[in-house]
Amino acid sequence: MSTVDKMISDMVVSRPRQYSSAIAPDASLRVPEASRPSNGGATVGFRSAKYTPMDWHSNNYAILQQAETDATAAERIQRLSKSLCKKSEADAQSRQSEGTRHLGGRLQEIHLLKSELQGHIEKLLAETDLLLLLKTRLEKALDATEIPYGIATDNLTCRERRLGPELVKDAVEDELLKEIDLIRNIQALLKRTIDQVVCQIQINREAKMTLELDWSDKWHAYNLDDQCGRYNNMSRNTQHHPSSATMQDQVSEPNSWLQFSQENLSRAAQEEHTTMNLRVLVERLLRDTTEDLRSQCAAVDQAFSQRCSELAEAKTLLELQLAQILDQIGAQERNIVALQQAILDKDAPQRVAQSRLYQRSHRPNMELCRDDPQLSLVEEVWQLDAMLSSLQQQLAEARGSLAHLEESRTALEKAIACKTHSLLVDKDKCMPHRRRYPTVVALAGY
């Protein structure tokens, strides 16, 4: 490299890079007034300029070189800027599309869970309404059991007024006691079932409230995400939120978010299953209790009918026997009258025979002979006495028989009166009262 080129290179490197579009001549390059060419001799011995032509060419070269370098750098920056703008635009659009796609997927997830929550809410509501209807039926069935309980106790009270030997612990009383025990057990079972139904209704309402709260949160989240998904670059209701990218405290994870709703749905499904089983149990309980009560009612009615038949048959037999006893009493009374008349009829022959013997006992001396008349009269008197004795004994027996017949008549009449009273109690009081027994529909709680 020559000395001149080295000087030019040093000048180009050492000069500052400050230029404008219209390069103004440096003040140092201005020709001083004293250096300007003149025609006078005053300029003789002085230089005509500050720089040499070489400097001038070097300066122009440097300026051109710097301009070319700056233009090249500017073109490179422009290319990079254009590429960066396109890339940033594409990235922004891609990110926005991806965010919109994620929001759409999230909306689908929320919608699916929200629909499932809504379905279980409706199921719980329907099951709870059915339980409320069953609770009403149970309460009506419990109230309906008071009627048969009152009927059974009234029957027992009425039958306590039976007379004498009719106050017997028969099959009717056994069936009535069974009916009372059955009604008490059914009432206790219905009360426990009502408590269980009320508890299940409360649990269903709590589960439904939990689902409704979860559904409400998802409804708000769905609306917010739907609004976010509708945002675009032309939306006018968007604004800057510099701190929105900061993660909030106490936020849930997708797994915990899904697990929370699944646990709520699982609990709701479990309560729905429990409610269905309880409804089936209550329906079976009402059906079984109704059948048991009606079966026991039929058993009591059958016992009453059989007892009334037995009483009527016994009463008929007693009445027939009483009729026979009355006939016997009449015959015995007539027999007594006949015996008394026979005894009276023997009085005259006895007086005649005794008078004959008495008169003949006054015969004098040898005339007082045991002759045939005497023997005949004695025999007659003995026979009359024997006849009277037999008649008296027969009369006593007849009178004793009549007394026994009277006692039998009294006993039969009392027995008939007792049977009549028992029939009145069982057939005319108890059995008509049992017609008020609730129907199957009433006992089932309808």
Image: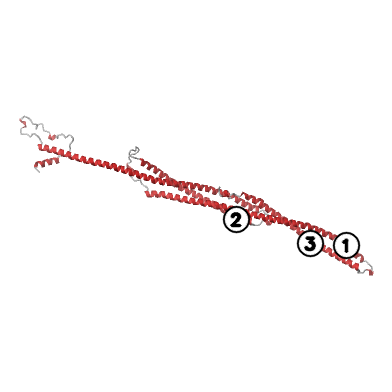
Say which residue label 1 marks. 349
Real-space CA distance between mark 3 and mark 1, rounded to the nearest whole angstrom: 24 Å
The vertical placement of 445 against 366, above or below, is: above
Q: How is the image coloured?
A: secondary structure
Q: Amino acid at mark 1?
A: Pro
Q: Is residue 415 above or below residue 446?
A: below
Q: Residues within 10 Å of mark 2 (few under 14, many from 20)?
A: some
Task: Give the labeled residue for mark 3.
Answer: 397
Would you say residue 202 is visible in this rendering? yes
* Residue nearer the viewer, 359 or 334: 334
Instruction: Give the residue displayed 52% in from the left and 47% down from the top.
Output: 133
Q: Nearer the viewer, residue 434 or 149?
A: 434
Mark 1 → mark 2, Cα distance in angstroms: 76 Å
For marks 2 and 3, the one nearer the N-term is 2
Q: Which residue is mark 2?
A: 178
Precedes in sequence: disc 3 or disc 1: 1
